[in-house]
Amino acid sequence: MGNEEQMRIEELANLISTQQHDSTRAAAYTELATILYINNLDTLYYLCNEASKIAEKNLRLNLSENEHLTFSKLNSEALANIGYYYQTIGNYDEAFRYYIKCLKIDIRIKNFKGLSSTFNNIGMLFTYKGNVKKALKYYLISLKIDEFLQDEETIGSSLNNIAYTYEQQGDTSNALMYYQKAQQYFQKHNDVNSEAAVLINIGSINRKQGKTTPSLSYFQQSLDNYTKLSNELGMASALLNIGVAYFDLKQFDSSLVYIENSLKLYKKNNRIGGITIALVNLGKIHLENNDFEKAISVGENALQLAKENGNLYNIQNAAQLLGKAYQQKERYKDALEMHQLYISSRDSIENKETQRSTIQQQLAYDYEKKELLTRAENDKKLAIAQNEKQKQRAIILAISIGLFLALVLGLFALNRWRVTQKQKVLIEEKNKKINLLLGEIHHRVKNNLQVVSSLLSLQERNIKDETAKTAISEGKERVKSMGLIHKMLYQNDNYTGIEMNSFVHELADGLISTFDLNKVDLNVSIENIKMDVDTAIPLGLILNELIMNSLKYAFDGVEKPILNIKLFEQNQQMVLEFSDNGNGKAEDLKESLHSFGMKLIQSLTRQLSGNLSIINANGLKITITFASYKLV
């Protein structure tokens, strides 16, 4: 880390501790995160989470238009960084959830630069999931926005990702072209870290094409860049690639030095995948040097790590290495075991068993079909030889009848097809009109509920009595719960039902924000459940009451508040489990069964033909089992 960077870190830390203006503090947290995350990824989550809290706290205030825009941008940037954190550690679902939050903010405030960045990040998610077509779609959207903004710095990132996607599709020509364009952009804007990553990609393509010497030059440039930044994981990757290139050139001594240095850095940073790959390559060098004992030692270490990590590719490579080494040491039983492991892991990766079964079935089918055709041909020749004249007449008659029937059936089918097509067009037009009408209905219902909520808010301001004020506030949250269902219906263009996982998250997050309890740890565990509106509305109102009850009464003096919500299907019934770690007791809640909130829960439970259970379990645990529900 250079002196200038260290000075900047100290300046930002000073701003965070002394600056009173929240926008400056939030910006300082985010900038500090982007500096420190290279050496400690966890700082990215912690610092950006602090920045997001500051922004969201201010966004709940009565701000001017400029202030609202400033805090919205700060919040979007912080959430995008948190999404990147989850993406880096492999939690793609959580990363996607944060990116969607960013998109909503950036669309609302017309932050095109933020939109470009988020589309690019979503493209990366689909790349990691193996859906390269979808990834390319998002990358190209990002690139179009960058070109519209003439933002040359971010164009480089989009070009790099497009190149990687082409490489995944096997289009090395386009991949190399886009990588080289990306490098030029990164170099122009002095983005040393990104340029280093692209240089490794260019070197790898050259190496795959047999251009090993040019690839070494690219890997060395990448290593120089990462060394300037003290980016140890980047250095480890570059060193490993240089070592593998020297191995291709059969310069095993040089290869050994680079791979051992790479291994040290991977071990220092506890990167199991990198350690495993480095060990396998070290084993290959020892094999070439006829040092079979060392090859076995590092190979066994690599195989153990690969099994612990569950990486089939690394298991396959380690097993292949050990098989060769055991064979050289005449440990044929061990060599056979490794060969079997190599085959099984390879088959798991490539799904060879399914492919082989399909091929065998096809061969059997082709053989049987050929036999049948041969027999039919022989029978036909024999029949013609025995009674050629009669056969010819029968054939002519059959053909005449067949042609006549075919003509009649063809005319009938053509007429039916025309009628069917007309009916299909009419049905499609009718369905479109119905869908438009449904969307408009849900939109209007949501708007009307929003008007009711606003009227309740106005009424709430003029009421002095706290009991009445609380009742109106709770009523407003109930209205919001119903409005959220109609909003999700028309926004997703799907009017048949509600995806409960997203609904519960959004409902709970909204209530937590309303009660200003952002430290609540929310755990939602819901299967892939999609409910119709008639079930989702009473269930949503029940959850609304339970969450409000916990947030209002349960967490007084609780250091780490926790809410747990589970929804699952069991024995042809739906089970809702709700619990907290608060101070509430089952006895107290049962005594309050005559309160409006509990009466509402009981009434809605009966509506769903359900049973209500309340017990103590390190807090309160409420279970509702109901049989009257409809899944979509």
Image (cartoon, grey):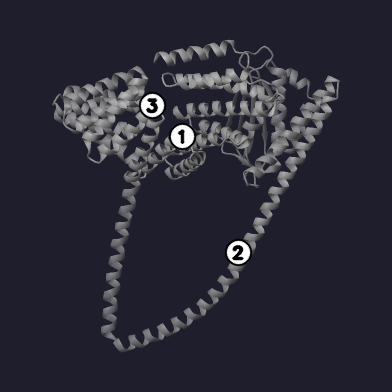
Q: CA distance from mark 2 to mark 1?
A: 47 Å
* Residue 284 image point, x, y percent: 20, 29
**What residue is pinned by disc 2?**
424
Who's the residue at 71% across and 19% down the image?
Answer: 586
Q: Residues within 10 Å of mark 3 (few under 14, many from 20)?
A: some
Tell me the kind of residue under disc 3.
Answer: Asn
* Residue 379 image point, x, y percent: 28, 76
**What residue is pinned by disc 3?**
193
Q: What is the quadrant of residue 552 in the picture?
A: top right
Q: CA distance from mark 2 to mark 3?
A: 57 Å
Q: Which mark is residue 231?
A: none
Q: CA distance from mark 1 to mark 3?
A: 14 Å
Q: Which mark is residue 154?
A: 1
Tell me the kind of residue under disc 1.
Answer: Thr
Q: Is residue 611 above or below residue 301?
A: below
Q: Is residue 603 left or right of residue 76?
A: right
